Image (cartoon, rainbow, N blue to C red):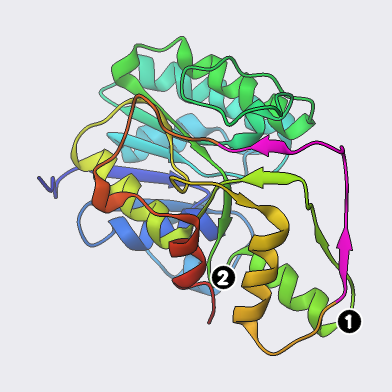
Amino acid sequence: MEEGGKKILILGGSGFLGHAIYKELCNYFDTYGTYFSARRTFEENQKFFRYDMQEDDVFHLLEKLRPQLIISALRGNFAAQAQLHQHLAEYVSGHDCKLYFLSSANVFDAYSKYPSYENDKTLSESIYGRLKIKIENMLLRLPKDKMAILRLPMVFGNGSPRVKEIKNLISLNEPVEVFPNLVINVTNDDKLTQQIHYLINHNKTGIFHLGSIDLVHHEDLIKEIVERIGNFNPIYKRVYTTNEERYLAVLPKYNKLPKNLGATAQDIIDHHILG
């Protein structure tokens, strides 16, 4: 099913997730990425372009590259992100091009009684969640075969900001925050990039929930990850936002991936959490 000729542009290609996606796809497709803060590895890579979403017009880059698929994995200024995605939606609607947007479980963070499924109504109490909803709503106005919204739970992995932060807190003897009542699902960079590769190969569009197929308490998850990191006895700061269990989990009901691409929370903990 590989389509070697397909040209893919990853916006945010130097970030943790963007770069993991680049590494997964670059041997199979004509893959390009953007970087913002200069690191020599990206400056010297002919497949990477410097792009500042607050300063640069994305249309220049798109006209130069003419990608058939854009994957948006950008972080940064919220107003600039919103404007950029407005421009991306305009470009995609007028060209032979699809847009994959990395969204978040936070689009549901105002709902806490149940896990969330693909067709559930979004509602967020956080600024971050509201930004993701705003961008999702722009994309939902595109023809369905032009876009995919990929909603992600917490993402772990060797180089992930979350694991780095935990290691840093332990080394400084600072408390690691855990949320005992929070029930989540999780993923890691390896599993996520395999799933995205599958979606591209099969020309999938629509809304996908790309997390573990089961749920885990945040406190149990973090404690088990810390055990994997090494023989430490860290201080835990237990944060209770409510007395009841609170869900922040995105589970698939309609757009399910093949079984071999699924993962349990335990699989995520067991694989590649360290390094």
Q: Which badge, 2 or 1, comes first in the chain's sequence?
A: 2
Residue 265 in the image, given as x and y percentages of width and height:
50, 56
Report the Cα–Cα distance between label 2 and label 1.
21 Å
Residue type, numbered disc 2 = Gly
Residue 203 in the image, given as x and y percentages of width and height:
22, 32
The residue singled out by tag 2 in the image is 159
Q: Secondary structure at mark 2?
A: loop
Residue 226 against residue 140 in the figure, above or below: below
The residue singled out by tag 1 in the image is 173
Q: Is residue 234 left or right of residue 110?
A: right
- Identify the magenta region: 235-249
Answer with the quarter of the image where residue 174 lies.
bottom right
Picture residue at 52% right of the left edge, 22% below the top: 87
Q: Is residue 3 left or right of residue 253?
A: left
> Of helix, strand and loop, which mostly describes the magenta segment?
loop
Picture residue at 73% right of the left edge, 59% below the top: 219
Residue type, numbered disc 1 = Asn
Residue 163 in the image, given as x and y percentages of width and height:
65, 69
Picture residue at 29% right of the left edge, 51% below the top: 261
Asked whether residue 247 is drawn in magenta, I would say yes
Residue at far bottom of view: 231
